[in-house]
Amino acid sequence: MNFDTANQILKENMALPDAKFGQNFLCDDIITNRIVELAGLKNGDNVLEIGPGIGAITRPISNLDVNLKCVEIDRRLVDILRDSDIDAEIISADYLKLRDYGAEKIDVVVSNLPYYIMTDIMKKIFSECTNSRTLVFMVEQAALERILAIPETKQYGPLSVLCSLYGDVKKEFVVPFSAFIPMPHTTSCVISLRRTSGRIDSGFEGFVEKCFSMRRKRLMKNLADYDRTEVLEAFSKLDIDINCRAEELKPEQFLSLYELLNNLVLND
Ligand code: SAM
């Protein structure tokens, strides 16, 4: 979708971009085609797009031999998409509240993420789309620092742990401001995440969240819901200091700790 088409759709439908929903619509075919290419779609894939907007990424994906499901919060845009010839299931909902959408069957997730809830959307994907193989997101440059953060840094947190354990995370390219209507205030870039780990249990996201719940306190304190003896045993097995804080643990240590405390074998 180029600038003129995007403008025309918005004007014809009197749909001014709404900042409260983080609406910055892509209007550059080169960028959208690159995003679709990065998704590496195969025939028959189940694809989820969060926030399709007026369909810039949706349309080229829907032209492929895939099953595309899109979740859009803005009713005006849902109507525009449903009235168009785009071949996709358009779900009118807030993705953060959506249940029963076949998450475990999703192979690929693509989203030009609404930045105001970027982290929450990513966490929901990690905990629910447990069999996906590729995620392609447009994110704020600032968020990328949290995504790629390493232990013992200020930026390190649940999102860094979840992304790191998912697999290979790559910053693909920076997107020029001119590729959006309206232009965003911050730099945006496209990232890809390709799964290298096995399926990660859906409860893991909540566990990591709990570990970081009081960042400055000892990890032990954040795990007060668990039996203290079991926590101490697990710490000892994994060589974790009882005085350490969550930010000192490597992503793999969180997974092993979760596995031990919940008697699970996660990484098959
Ligand atoms: N994909 C389109 C594009 O690239 O042009 C639009 C991207 S725009 C940055 C973010 C989109 O997410 C908007 O269409 C917005 O209405 C939608 N959105 C915002 N919050 C949402 C939510 N909680 N659930 C589903 N969609 C949401």
Image: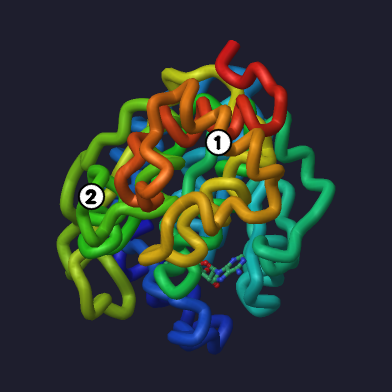
Quickly name the residue at label 1.
Answer: 232
Specify the label residue 152 is tagged with: 2
Instruction: Answer with mark 1 or mark 2, whichever residue precedes in sequence.
Output: 2
Q: Is residue 68 visible?
A: no
Q: Measuring from the top left, give residue 27's x and y in whole percent.
A: 32, 63
Q: Quadrant of the N terminus?
A: bottom left
Q: Does residue 195 appear anywhere in the picture? A: yes
Q: Residue placed at 58% from the left, 40% from the top?
A: 62
Going by the numbered disc 2, the residue's amino acid type is: Glu
Cα distance between the residues tagged 1 and 2: 22 Å
Total labels drawn: 2
Q: Residue at x 45, y 41 (%)?
A: 162
Which amino acid type corresponds to the residue marked 1 in the rendered image? Leu
Q: Is residue 233 left or right of residue 240?
A: right
Q: Nearer the viewer, mark 1 or mark 2?
A: 1
Left or right of 133, for residue 100: right
What SS does tag 2 mark?
loop
Which sits in the foreground, 229 or 212?
Answer: 229
Badge 2, how many Cα within 10 Å: few under 14, some, many 20+?
Answer: some
Element type at mark 1: helix
In the foreground, 111 or 56: 111
